[in-house]
Image: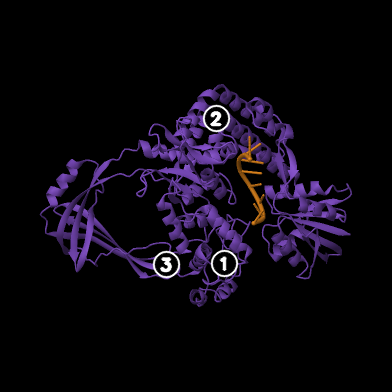
Chain colours: A purple, B orange
DNA sequence: GCAAGGTC
């Protein structure tokens, strides 16, 4: 009797085998795929790990080429599943021949249920093989043992719900992506993508930019007085900001010759400041973004640190350490790291009292260190991110900071002013976590009725500021708030917007193309540009899970809506083509051609798909320049100081944006190259 | 060559 146990990934397979076998499993291989074997409760178990989804939906071959004519048919075409990890599927098929029983032990969520169902479908089991489900939400001894002692059935509805999402996402994504790309002639590497998550995310960026553009700064006035008792400090008029100059001037006139301020009230109190909560993925990415590291880069580094056994699994929603997490052992482990001193201090506390975040889930623990590393062992961003994770962990266990907050109100010539002070008495967790700034603001101790010297009176004119552009961290937080994407996909989606040339900059701004795409979608296929579509899909999936709806119903309802949207898009396809092409033209425009001085230099593609810069006066002007084949090309305003020719900025993945002269033979480029080589 | 979701 052999029980085949299916896990979501190799790591989980190892944990399950280790726990059930109490560490004494045999590691065997089928086609180089590890299969972990051991006896358990009278049966022989064989545990195998998947690699997430091992099947993917795609359209039949007759829809391989993209054209506008068959899009209406594509809407109603069922996609078919094809394997993504061939060797693993072959191994699974071989293992299936041994199976008397199958236990699906993937993550306990929709996608996990589907991953299990996919594996079962691949195995082509005979009907007398029992298929069961072990349901656990953490890879810990008690959870796993409990799950295998209380086996349940595979929940097909749950798997079907996830599968329905796949079908709907592919249909909308493929049909609208193909429409946008073919209607505008943007084929090949420059295609224009549309999707349930990426398009509403892009719309967030576009909407923010519009808010910034229509923003009109509003002037305001504040009245400040400079006071002195031992040292200088200041107070503000209690009215706060004045939106009119008149009343502000009136106050200023009243107090301008004042010599003393009378203390009406003085309050000083000591306050504890709790440390920040444990890291989930979103919080981690928010912090990383402030360090100037992109979200996708940070996740790649975190993945590496995870597989190297230095930090825990980086994809989690959880902000509360489970009670089973061995905090003390982790601190002891960190004694071997570059943070030995800090770890020792934290360990020396009588009791460990970790902070808790707002979200508690059971998928994975918050991101925390699991192994020790030193600065010599890790380089660059690897070290910076490891350090961040360690310091965050230490901070969540560190003592509160103690601050003295002071507040006072003053009477000056019948006008009321107020002042605040902030003094750190005990650094507490701040000393472990230097990423959050906390500046002291001086204010002396005062007594009610006391008089202090007025040494100056100032009226200050200010202007309201427009809303800020999103950083990657803030955008990812906003996506989470709106239910867009998951902990594992949000950073990829943001990266995708850059890769498609829809957005640019550290402070994220839409490109012309990005704006035009959103405009076209909002005018013609509104649904896909709003987060509501995700909400609707979530509701439909819940109904499928409850057995209230069938997959076919949800898919055909979705097809109806997609068909309608496509119809509208097709009737406006000429307008859309023109708008997008105009936007692209503007975006690909580098500069006036320095050779013929008549045409414009624009980014073009050769017949073989290589991009280069050519002149719009071609064939009269044959001026061309080669371009790097990777990264986004952005024109730069200033001409090169050396050759006076146009410059470009190249923004490539995993590299710092690079300013270069369009003319490769210009000496300025050589200089840059050399100085880079010297740095290495 | 499309999406989004798992995972590496």
Q: Earlier in the sequence, mark 3 or mark 1?
A: 1
> Where residue A672 appears, x then y in whole percent?
43, 56
With A261 as the anchor, is A137 left or right in this view?
A: right
Q: Nearer the viewer, residue A544 or A456?
A: A456
Q: Earlier in the sequence, mark 2 or mark 1?
A: 2
Distance from label 2 to label 1 (Cα)? 49 Å
> Where residue A298 appears, x then y in whole percent?
53, 57
Single out the mark in the foreground, 2 or 1: 2
Tell me the number on the disc at residue A369: 1
Q: Tell me whether the residue at label 2 lies in contact with that at label 1, contact meaning CB atoms closer than 8 angstroms.
A: no
Dot 1, crowdedness within 10 Å: few (<14), some or many (≥20)? many
Q: Which residue is mark 2?
A: A184
Q: Earlier in the sequence, mark 2 or mark 3?
A: 2
Q: Residue at x 86, y 48 (%)?
A: A125
> Residue most toward the top?
A571
With A158 as the anchor, is A176 left or right in this view?
A: left
With A507 as the anchor, is A182 left or right in this view?
A: right
When asked about the image quadrant of residue A569, the answer is top right
The chain that hosts pointer 2 is A
Q: Nearer the viewer, residue A312 or A363?
A: A312
> Residue most toward the left?
A257
> Where residue A532 appears, x then y in whole percent?
55, 37
């Amino acid at each position: 009797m052999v029980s085949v146990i299916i896990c979501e990934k190799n790591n989980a397979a190892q944990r399950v085998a280790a726990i059930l076998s109490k560490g004494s499993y045999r590691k065997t291989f089928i086609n180089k795929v590890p299969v972990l074997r051991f006896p358990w409760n009278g049966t022989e178990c064989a545990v195998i790990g998947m690699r997430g989804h091992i099947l993917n939906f795609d359209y039949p071959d007759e829809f391989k080429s993209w054209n506008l004519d068959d899009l209406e048919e594509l809407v109603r075409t069922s996609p078919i599943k094809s394997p993504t990890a061939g060797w693993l599927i072959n191994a699974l098929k071989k293992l299936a021949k041994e199976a008397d029983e199958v236990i699906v032990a993937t993550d306990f969520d929709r996608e996990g249920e589907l991953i299990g169902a996919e594996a079962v479908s691949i195995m082509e089991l005979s009907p007398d093989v029992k298929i069961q489900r072990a349901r656990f939400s953490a890879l810990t001894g008690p959870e796993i043992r409990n799950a295998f002692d209380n086996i349940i059935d595979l929940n097909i509805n749950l798997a079907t719900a996830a599968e329905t999402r796949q079908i709907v996402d592919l249909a909308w994504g493929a049909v609208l992506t193909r429409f946008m790309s073919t209607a505008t002639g943007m084929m090949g590497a420059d295609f224009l993508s549309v999707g349930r998550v990426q398009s509403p995310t892009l719309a967030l960026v576009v909407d923010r930019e519009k808010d910034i553009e229509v923003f009109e700064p509003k002037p305001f006035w504040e009245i400040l007085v400079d006071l002195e008792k031992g040292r200088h400090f200041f107070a503000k008029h209690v009215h706060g900001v004045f939106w009119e100059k008149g009343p502000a001037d009136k106050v200023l006139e009243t107090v301008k010759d004042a010599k003393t301020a009378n203390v009406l009230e003085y309050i000083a109190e000591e306050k504890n400041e709790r440390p920040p909560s444990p890291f989930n993925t979103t919080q981690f990415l928010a912090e990383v973004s402030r360090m100037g590291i992109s979200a996708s880069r940070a996740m790649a580094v975190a993945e590496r640190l995870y597989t190297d056994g230095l930090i825990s699994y980086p994809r989690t929603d959880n902000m509360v350490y489970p009670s089973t997490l061995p905090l003390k052992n982790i601190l002891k482990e960190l004694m071997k790291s570059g943070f030995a001193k800090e770890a020792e201090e934290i360990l020396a506390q009588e009791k460990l009292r970790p902070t808790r975040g707002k979200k508690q889930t059971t998928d994975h623990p918050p991101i925390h260190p699991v192994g020790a590393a030193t600065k010599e062992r890790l380089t660059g961003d690897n070290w910076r991110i490891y350090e961040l994770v360690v310091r965050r962990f230490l901070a969540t266990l560190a003592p509160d900071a103690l601050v003295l907050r002071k507040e006072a109100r003053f009477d000056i010539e019948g006008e009321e002013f107020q002042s605040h002070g902030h003094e750190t008495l005990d650094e507490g967790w701040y000393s472990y976590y230097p990423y959050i700034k906390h500046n002291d603001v001086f204010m002396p101790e005062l007594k009610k009725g006391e008089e202090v010297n007025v040494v100056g009176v100032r009226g200050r004119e200010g202007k309201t500021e427009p809303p800020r552009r999103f950083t990657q961290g803030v955008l990812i937080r906003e996506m989470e708030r709106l239910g867009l994407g998951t902990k594992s996909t949000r950073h990829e989606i943001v990266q995708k917007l850059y890769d498609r040339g829809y957005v640019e900059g550290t402070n994220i701004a839409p490109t012309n193309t990005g704006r035009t795409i959103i405009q076209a979608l909002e005018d013609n296929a509104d649904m896909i540009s709003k987060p509501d579509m995700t909400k609707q899909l979530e509701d439909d999936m819940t109904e499928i899970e409850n057995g209230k709806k069938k997959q076919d119903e949800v898919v055909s309802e979705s097809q109806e809506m997609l068909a309608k949207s496509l119809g509208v898009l097709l009737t406006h396809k000429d307008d859309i083509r023109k708008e997008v092409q105009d936007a692209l033209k503007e975006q690909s425009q580098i500069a006036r051609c320095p050779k013929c001085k008549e045409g414009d230099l624009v980014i073009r593609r050769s017949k073989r798909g290589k991009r280069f810069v050519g002149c719009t006066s071609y064939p009269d002007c044959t001026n061309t320049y080669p371009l790097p084949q990777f990264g986004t090309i952005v024109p730069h305003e200033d001409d090169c100081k050396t050759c006076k020719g146009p410059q470009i900025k190249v923004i490539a993945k995993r590299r710092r944006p690079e300013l270069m002269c369009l003319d490769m033979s210009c000496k300025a480029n050589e200089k840059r190259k050399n100085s880079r080589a010297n740095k290495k």
